Structure formats: C-alpha cells, structure tokens
Image: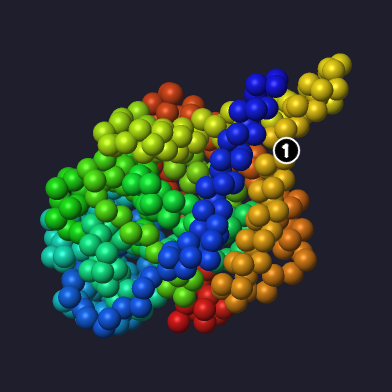
C-alpha cells in the first residue's frame, strides 16, 4: 500500500508541476502570448472543417471563419456522402461565398476525422493548413497573428488556443473548461519547449509541405492530433504554441456525461495507440523520450488511480493497519489537495481572462465536484484500456448542440 501511495502521489505531483508551467514566472507567462502582428499577409491558409451530423452548428462556424481579416484563406468543408443534412448546410454556404468556401465529399466507408482530413488534403492550395471543428467560434484576427507567428519564429507548426466556454451549463462543465484552460494556457507550452508535443485537436496550423511530407493524418488513430504531433516532433519540426484569451477558438463542453465519457475514452485510447506505434522512440534525447512515455502512459496512470485510490481509502479506514501505514495511504491526497487549491486560483484567473462572473457557488462546485469528475475521467481511462485490449477502435462521435453560442460568448469573442 505504501508503494502504491507513493506512485499515486508522484503522479499527482508531477501533473501539478507541469500544469503550473506558464505561471512559474511573469516572463514565462508573457512568452505564452502571440506577438503583435506586423500587418503583412504573406502566407495563404487552407482551413479544413470536417463536419459530420453538424447541421446545427456548421453554418455559424463558417460565417465566423468568413469574418477573418486576413486576405489569403480558403475554407474546405468536408462532409460525408451519407450525411445529406450537413452537406446541404455546407453547399448553401459555398454558394454564398464562391471561391472562398469549397465542399469536399468524404466517400470513405469508415468515417472519422483523420480520414476526412486526408480526403481534403489533395485540394489544399494554401501555404499553411489549419484545422477547426464544426462547432468552433474563431476570432476574425486569428489568422493575422498566426501568419506573423510562422514568419517571426520560423515554425513548422503553430498551435493556437482552444477554450471551452460554457462553464455554467452543468456540474462538470466547470471542471471541463478549466482542463482546457490549463492544457492550452500552460501544459502545451511545456511540451513545445521540451520538443515533444501532442498537438491539440484544432486551431493547429501546419505548413502544407511539412504535412504532405508526413503523409497527413493516420486514418486509424483515435487521437490523430496527438499522433501528428508525435510524428512531427520525432522529425525535429519546430512547434510554436501561443495562447491569448481574446483570440482563442471557443467551443462547448459535451452536453451529457455519456458524451464526455465517450470523448475521453476516444482520446485516451488514441494516446495508447500512439504509445503502441512507437514513433516517439525516434525522439533524439532521452528526456524527450521520457516525457513522451510518461505522457502517453497517462491513461494507464489515470485508470490505475481510479481503482487504487478508493481501495486505499477503504483499506485505511476499515482494515486494522498500523497508524503509520494507514497515514501513508493518504499521501496522494496532499498533491491532490494542492491541485484543488491551484484550480481555485485558476478559476479566478479564468473568470478575469474571459470577463465571466465567478461566484461562491462556482468555487463550491469546483471543490465538491473534484472527486466525482476525477472518477468520470478514471472510468473513461479504464474503458479506453479495455477497448484497446479488446481491439474495439470505432470512432464514437461527440454531439454538439451549440451551448457556447450565446450572447455573452459572442460579445467576448467579437
């Protein structure tokens, strides 16, 4: 029990330390932002927008992209051959913006995001490929900042920020929003600095020649973004990460616990697939390979903690153990409690960044919901491990209902 407690405590402490990366010094925090663009529009962009059963939100997303202040971009919407409702929305948008919006049909029998993206790759004409999701709210000035970031840093990849915004929709949405806040605001910057990065699923921009050399996306991987990031990292690609609250791409949380569970299962299983593929072993330094192994093993750690922590607490309370051993079983609680304290401070910062009213009720939700939310994530990790072990790798689609599209979100994103 002492060994298990030590392992869990270490895992929690390392996770907390990495999550705090951007806040270690004022200089580190300032360096995570986009530099001010110079006004030049030298690069051209092909923005890929895969959409499957997204007729409820797709038109809004296309209209947001069409508001871009950058001069050189095209929007390529990818729809399935068996999805007439979404296709109708896409074709209507293309008819209104000829030359700017192109619709590509995905005829793959097995439908998923990476296969849809690969379907669009031959149609790409821009210097840079950008990926967005069908429910995204994209800031009009984003492409100008990304253009400048590529030219000023010499990057092969620019990862922008993504933020779930409807923090008040459910008891778990607040935790979900903070996860994104810490991941894109801080954690991805650490990975970019170390030279190993599992890219975020959208608002990621890759030079077209680099993407083609890498043969696009792995159509069999459930975390195609992570896989692409690992493959590009192993080939020495330079990745720049930038997060600015005014420029983030805004999204919604999954609308039910079931949707959240399936989404996290897919991501975790995708990490396990990337681990199994072993591309990360080609990273040049031992430190990078260690970081990669630890990151990709995350689903195992999370699944293990979901089993071990409740058992450990039950044993400590119910079993007749020496006081020292019983106390040792609670060691993991210390970094977990520190993480809750850090999240409490982060919630305040999240509210300030997005001009959201954070009340005592939200802080109570954060504290009281921490354990239930952790259990949901642990169940998702266990489910991912089981699905990977049994060879079930079908894509479980996340439904989007547009919960983030409201007056406050529009005002903040404009």
Which quarter shows the C terminus? Answer: bottom left
Which quarter shows the N terminus? Answer: top right
Disc 1 on helix, strand or loop? helix
Residue 77 placement (x, y as % from top left) = 26, 64
Can residue 39 be seen from the camera position used here? yes
Query: From the viewer's perspective, is residue 323 above or below residue 243?
Result: above
Residue depicted at x 18% and y 71%: 44
Residue 352 placement (x, y as % from top left) = 61, 73
Query: From the viewer's perspective, is residue 95 above or below residue 387?
Result: below
Can residue 402 be seen from the camera position used here? no
Front one among 327 and 141: 327
Residue depicted at x 85% and y 18%: 322
Query: From the viewer's perspective, is residue 94 above or below residue 287?
Result: below
- Number of marks drawn: 1
Front one among 22 and 49: 22
In the rendered structure, the answer to whether residue 56 lies left or right of residue 204 reads: right
Residue depicted at x 17% and y 45%: 215
Residue matched to label 1: 333
Residue depicted at x 19% and y 52%: 211
Residue 145 placement (x, y as % from top left) = 32, 74
In the rendered structure, the answer to whether residue 14 lies left or right of residue 200 reads: right
Residue 296 position by quadrant: top left
Query: From the viewer's perspective, is residue 21 above or below residue 313?
Result: below
């Amino acid at each position: 029990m002492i060994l298990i407690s030590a392992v869990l405590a270490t895992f929690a402490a390392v996770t907390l330390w990495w999550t705090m990366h951007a806040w270690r010094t004022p200089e580190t925090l300032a360096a995570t932002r986009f530099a001010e663009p110079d006004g030049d529009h030298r690069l051209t962009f092909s923005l890929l927008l895969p959409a499957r059963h997204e007729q409820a939100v797709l038109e809004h997303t296309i209209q947001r992209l069409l508001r871009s202040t950058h001069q050189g971009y095209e929007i390529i919407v990818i729809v399935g051959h068996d999805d007439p409702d979404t296709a109708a929305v896409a074709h209507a948008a293309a008819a209104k913006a000829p030359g700017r919006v192109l619709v590509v049909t995905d005829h793959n029998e097995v439908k998923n995001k990476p296969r849809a993206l690969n379907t669009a790759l031959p149609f790409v004409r821009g210097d840079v490929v950008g990926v967005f999701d069908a429910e995204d709210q994209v800031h009009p000035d984003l492409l100008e900042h990304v253009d400048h970031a590529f030219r000023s840093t010499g990057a092969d990849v620019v990862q922008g920020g993504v933020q779930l915004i409807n923090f008040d929709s459910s008891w778990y949405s607040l935790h979900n929003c903070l996860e994104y806040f810490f991941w894109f605001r801080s954690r991805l910057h650490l990975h970019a600095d170390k030279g190993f990065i599992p890219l975020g699923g959208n608002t990621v921009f890759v030079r077209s020649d680099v993407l083609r050399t890498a043969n696009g996306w792995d159509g069999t991987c459930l975390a195609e973004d992570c896989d692409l990031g690992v493959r590009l990292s192993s080939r020495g690609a330079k990745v720049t990460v930038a997060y600015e609250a005014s420029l983030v791409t805004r999204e919604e949380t999954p609308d039910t616990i079931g949707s959240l569970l399936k989404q996290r299962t897919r991501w975790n299983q995708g990490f396990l697939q990337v681990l199994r593929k072993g591309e990360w072993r080609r990273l040049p330094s031992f430190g990078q390979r260690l970081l990669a192994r630890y990151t990709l093993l995350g689903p195992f750690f999370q699944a293990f903690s979901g089993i071990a922590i409740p058992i450990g607490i039950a044993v400590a309370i119910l079993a007749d153990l020496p006081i020292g051993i019983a106390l040792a079983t609670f060691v993991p609680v210390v970094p977990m409690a520190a993480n809750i304290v850090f999240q409490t401070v982060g919630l305040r910062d999240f509210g300030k960044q997005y001009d959201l009213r954070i009340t005592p009720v939200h802080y109570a939700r954060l504290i009281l919901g921490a354990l239930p939310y952790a259990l949901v994530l642990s169940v998702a990790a266990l489910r991912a491990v089981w699905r990977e072990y049994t060879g079930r790798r079908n894509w479980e689609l996340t439904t989007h209902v547009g919960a983030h599209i409201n007056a406050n979100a529009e005002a903040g994103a404009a």
